[in-house]
Image: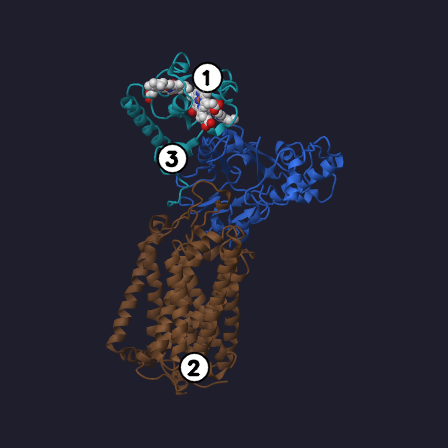
Chain colours: A brown, B cyan, C blue
Amino acid sequence: MTQRAETAGLTLNAMESMLVDRLKSGSNAYYFALLVTGLMMLAGAIAGLQATVGGHHVYYGVSRQIPWGILISTYVYFAITSTGICLVSSIGHIFGVKAYMPIAKRAVFLSIITLSAGFLVIAAEIKVPIRMLVYNIISPNFTSNIWWMGALYGLALGVMIFEFIFLLLGKYKLAVACGFVAVVGELAANSNLAGVFGLLNGREFWHGPYLPIFFIASGVMVGCSCLILFHLWAERINEGPLHPGMPDCLSAIRKVAILMICVIAFFTIWRTVATLAGHPDGQYVGVMAMLTGEYSLSFWGGEILLSLLIPLGLYLFSKGTNMKLMLTAAILMLIGVFFMRHNMVIVGQVIPVFQGLGVTGSTELLKYSPTVHELMIVVGGFGFVGFMFLLGEKIFNGYPVEDHH
Amino acid sequence: MRLILTTILCSSIFLLAGAATTLAEGDYPEDIYYMKPVIGVVFSHQLHVEDNGMDCDSCHDGIFEMEARLAENEESFTMAGLADGEFCGACHDGDTAYDANTRCTTCHVGVIGYSRAHGLVNEEGPAHH
Amino acid sequence: MKNLKNLDKMTNEGVDNCSVEERRHFLKMGLTVTGVFAGGTILSAVSSVNKVYASTSGFVEKYPYKPHYSMIMHIENCIDCEKCKSACAETNGVPSYGFRTNILERQVAGALDQQREFIPVLCNHCNLAQCTRVCPTKATYKDPNNGIVMMNIEKCIGCLSCQLGCPYNARYFNEEKWAVDKCTFCWESRLSKGAKTTGCSEACPAGVRIFGDLSNPSDRVYKEVHQMTKTVWVLRPQAGTKPNVFYTRG
């Protein structure tokens, strides 16, 4: 309540010393985490620069028929997570459901940094980023999903930054207005991201209208886990409970997570059954590669166990009160979903386009394995999220919660 | 492309040398791959001698020399030449054997077939780039 | 069982016993199928007499460009000598790690006549091109006059979505140009300078690649596509992009 008055009356110098004080208040573990995530970021930045200067074809494992590698799947991971966080937090913050209110500020901040991480990672995959900045604006193609996705995510990012500033300044009406625009923008951007894959008739593995729904549902699912993880982590950093309403809030988020896990499991089952029933050209081999083939470990282990079944069990068992179980569930899901995104992006491309023609070499799946540089950039993306989160906790003083509306 | 051509040329020289040294009595040489005027025409002694029971004289008595790829130097070693009854066309005229003007890919295995036979990696394989 | 026995006893009626109407009907059916194969654009294909359709309105709309560049492949003649590939590389400066056109091989072990066939592929310059739809900056676009799918390399950001949008693997990233590169029917290197055919078509020693104008009834490609004695098809019709490269045998 008093923070607003404080900030308003501060001189620049006083603000600086206040920030320094806050940053100095961390524990040893805090600084260690800051160092580790900082180094991760640095590694990613070095790898990204080297590859951009030296040429992607030298440093990346992508190829003519698999032009999108782990960097795209990581981008997809971060972008969808950002949407998920934005949607879950909007339940309280925009639509006024009380239980979800305490997370508002941190959630907006998390949504901003995950999306930024996504943009940083994809900047390393776009071959000529400079032309992107220019021609996306002066030569837009309105039939292109990738254009809409970029524009809408860009818009959402900008609006969320304003939303966050308004929240800090206590201008709640403006913040809610921005928040609403951000939710709509994120939703539209997210479904266009799905459209980037789902509208390609020539790639049967992705093709179809179900991807956008899948993206949003799975986004909410990871968004929940992400919020649970970072709030429990924040409790550690701040050495104490964040807000009296927080346990109830996390328990409510847990319920949404459980619901969404069921939705995604349902989707996964029916996608699989549909493919097994009809052997659709171009899809069947992909699904089989995940069920029994080369991608079976990452499918059963990552996509099914880590992101769906184990978190489902743990969330149920935790009853919303056992925070250790919930934390474990959240971490496992965030790892598992990484595989889920990777499978989606890669398996869609390893099926040769001329497979239906039965030409030589087209019966086998193509191969892609990420290079060290690609992996370092991925690590850098995660480092960025961690680093910014840690900084944010101190700079914004653990996001003190005020009641509004 | 130039790179492929040079590799192909180099390896065919090795093949030439190899085939000449490995020949034993009553034996016949390995498959011969012609490179000119087009890459990838295969001639198989095994197929003609063993599977179709021809004797050496049916070819090595005027039609072909006993030296691999010598025919390449002749002007008439083309489809037009074959149609006039030269070289393979002596038999592949639709009478003795099927007409050279049909079933093109029995003789022509192409750059792909040539590369495969010589263990050269095909560009469009599952490998990178 | 009974039916089967009867079937055995049946004799072939032969074509002679078949009425003209029946034959027409049958041929029409075949035509529809061909039309579907050809991406739905040439449902109105007719045997070599083409006046019937030239006068129908709507026909012109099916070939929206003038000239409507197109190619038909006589694949049974393709011997994978790859002279087309070298000519293409030379004409258009295609680097060794990429290609604008390629030859695929299909092997059928049990086939009686020959056990392989070669299938030349290149950009199909589709009427409903996906590459141009997905390009965020209009770096790749359909030329409004001749329908060629072109590249404006200045605008290419290298997101490579066009490579994924293409059902024919016709695109690659050219590291020297810093842009995606693809077949343009030799527009820059030849057609725009007055040449009548593409480099690959000219280099082919076996007459496989016939280049022409699908909007011109006296053109060879037009005639070969608009007939029904020989099957004409396109690759991956189910991708729905209405390609302009046709395939036939004989």
Of mark 3 and mark 1, the one earlier in the sequence is: 1
Q: Is the residue under label 3 in contact with that under label 2 (CB below 8 Å)?
A: no
Q: In this view, does C145 lie above or below A296?
A: above
Observer-side mark, 2 or 3, equals 3
Q: How far apart are marks 3 and 1 (CA)?
A: 28 Å
Q: Is the residue under label 2 in contact with that under label 1 (CB below 8 Å)?
A: no
Q: Can residue A12 be seen in this view?
A: no
Graded by Cα atoms within 10 Å as few (under 14), some (14 to 19) or many (20 or more), the crowding at tag 2 reads many
Question: Which residue has dot 2 on it?
Answer: A249
What is the number of the mark on residue A33?
none
Give the chain of mark 1: B
Q: Which of C70 and A358 is in front in this view?
A: A358
Question: Which residue has dot 3 on it?
Answer: B116
Q: Can residue B18 be seen in this view?
A: yes
Query: Which residue: 39% across, 57% down?
Result: A296
SS for callout 3: helix
Three-letter code for the amino acid on which mark 3 is drawn: Arg
What is the number of the mark on residue B76?
1
Q: Is residue A24 above or below residue C190?
A: below
Query: Which residue: 25% across, 75% down?
Result: A29
Give the chain of mark 2: A
Give the chain of mark 3: B
